[in-house]
Amino acid sequence: MTTVLEDHGFPYDVELFEEDGPVLIERGQVQTLCAAVENGNPLFWDDEVAAGLTGGPVAPLTMLSAWFRPHHWEPGAAEPLVPLALHFALKERLGLPESVVAANTLTFHDPVRPGDRLRTCQVLKSVSDVKRTQLGQGRFWVIEVRYRNQDDALVGTDTYTMFSYRTPTGADHD
Amino acid sequence: MTDLYAGQVSVEDRLPELRHQVTASTVVLGALATRDWRPMHHDRDFAIHHNGIRDIFLNTPSQAAWFERYLTDWTGPRGRLARLTFAMKDSVFPGDLMTLSGRVTGLATDPVGCAWAEVELALSVSGAVRTSASARIALPVDRSDNPWARRGERWCP
């Protein structure tokens, strides 16, 4: 199959920037988050309930992106992974230094479980023509981040609609 | 925590509000628990002098976790979140009393028998919406139904 590159240099609907998650899914981190938001859902605290409903312990669904943030430090680490690398590559390619997240949708498939190893990739869904907004002149684009477990089962997607733009002054809001 | 069944829910139902006094600990715990080490979520001087805002603020993943907790407080553990869309309009800071609220906007049963509630959500401070969201969550139809048991073609988030 031939991959078609659009005028911005990236293809649509092709999985790019595949990465292994930097951490093993583990229950300590799950309960730390539950404690932070005072989430008493027994799925995360009671093995018997988790066994009965979800076939064993699971992680809060909204933790998906957390599993792809590397440790703050680790021995011999290279440069940390850049989240949404496709977004930053598009910004650079199109010369649009500033960005805001216009919308974000998380979709959940199979649950993530302690012991899982996750992988991710990024898929470009669309890039708009040049638009003028109150923020400046730029383009909207939609990137779908896909997450899969060690069995290649889809566990979720994280879809970002970004608006990247240029103004005479101002900082990058990413 | 008791289970909520689809038949107990009507369109326009309001979820019980959840109020939480946000402190620096709320912000820092949420950021670190979501593995977000960026300094604007734990270093007040950085937030003020680099970001130009008044304090550290709740990061996006911990707001998502607050919404997830809020929804399953309502549904009980059988409720299975399928989709969450949100837009942040303003930041949430230590000292804010945040209120999470929700309203059921739709109910449906899909072709494979899964019952769904669509819920409009808001995180507000002093009556102003700081983050708006919408969610799609599966509810059990009866005691024999478990949305978590659905896989593959039987789970259509």
Image (spheres, grey):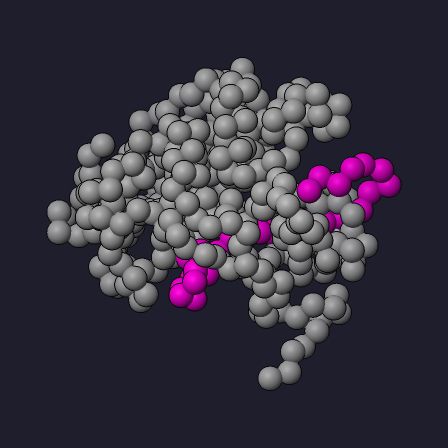
Could you say which quadrant of the image residue B109 lies in? bottom left
Point 50% across, 28% down: residue = B29
- Where residue B33 appears, as percent x and y from the top left, is 49, 35
Specify whether A83 is left or right of A106: right
Q: Depth check: B147 or B17 in front?
A: B147
- Residue B34 visible to an observer of this rendering: yes
Does A153 appear in magenta?
yes
Q: Position of residue B147 (x, y in %)?
A: 25, 52
Indicate left or right for A93 with B127 as reference.
Answer: right
At 45% from the left and 56% from the top, the residue drawn is A117
Say if B119 sits above or below A39 in the image.
below
Question: In the displayed structure, would residue A146 be above or below residue B128?
Answer: below
- Of A81 and A142, which appears nearest the observer? A81
Give above or below for B123 relative to A165: above
Given the current orientation, which residue lies at the most extreme front position? A75
Q: Please check the rendered image and state whether residue B113 is part of the magenta-colored stretch, yes or no.
A: no
Quarter holding the N terminus of chain A is bottom right
| Residues shaded magenta | A148-174
Q: Residue at x 31, y 27 (%)?
A: B16
- Give how far across and how far down residue A147 sits, in percent: 48, 58
Mark yes or no: residue B127 visible.
Answer: no
- Look at the image and tell me in which quarter the C terminus of chain A lies: top right
Lateral position of residue A112 relative to residue B109, left or right: right
